Image: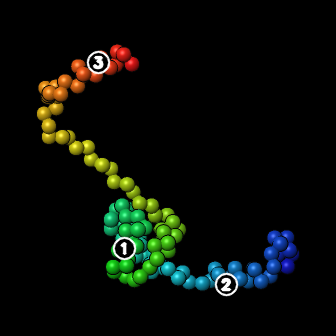
Amino acid sequence: MAILLQVASFSRSTFYYQCQVLERDDKYKELKVHICAIYDKHKGRYGYRRITAVLRKSVQQINHKTVQRLMQELGLKSLIRVKKFRVSSGQGDVSVPNILQRNSMLRPLMKNG
């Protein structure tokens, strides 16, 4: 093992530190479950801000940066809702009388300039 550490240019303490880190439990395991549940419940339309607001109301006080980081680790991104096309209730091509006579007033100015 000493040869491998020497080739990788790592110290022995770094190796053992990384072994301990891998054995630790995930601090945010329960929070990740809650985030995934909220995300799935709202069909992926909630981003980290809205998920943070829901978590603060129900589970616990949590920082929005933590929620954002955990969502990035989980690969969750909010989806943008497609805006529906709305037809106006107007008549369509209805001609309106030119009360101000704007075109006739501007024509002499346009010819000179």
Residue 104 visible to the viewer = yes
What amino acid type is highlighted by mark number 3?
Answer: Arg
Disc nearer the start of the sequence (2/1)? 2
Q: Residues within 10 Å of mark 2 (few under 14, many from 20)?
A: few
In the rendered structure, find residue 18 and report the number of the disc placed on it.
none
Kindly identify which residue carries mark 2: 20
The quarter of the picture where residue 89 lies is top left
The secondary element bearing badge 3 is classed as helix
Residue 82 in the image: state x and y as whole percent.
Answer: 33, 50
Horizontally, residue 109 falls left or right of residue 28, namely left
Q: Is residue 44 above or below residue 14?
A: above
Horizontally, residue 59 falls left or right of residue 21, namely left
Find the distance from the CA under tag 2 to the CA under tag 3: 83 Å
**Looking at the rendering, in which quadrant would you find the N terminus?**
bottom right
Residue 66 in the image: state x and y as whole percent.
Answer: 50, 74
Q: Nearer the viewer, residue 90 or 25?
A: 90
Q: Nearer the viewer, residue 108 or 98?
A: 108
In the rendered structure, find residue 107 and report the number of the disc placed on it.
3
The secondary element bearing badge 2 is classed as helix
The secondary element bearing badge 1 is classed as helix
Q: Residues within 10 Å of mark 1 (few under 14, many from 20)?
A: some
Residue 102 in the image: state x and y as whole percent.
Answer: 23, 25
Q: Nearer the viewer, mark 2 or mark 1?
A: 1
**Looking at the rendering, in which quadrant would you find the C terminus?**
top left
Disc nearer the start of the sequence (3/1)? 1
Name the residue: 86% across, 74% down.
Answer: 6
Residue 74 visible to the viewer = no
Find the distance from the CA under tag 3 to the CA under tag 1: 58 Å
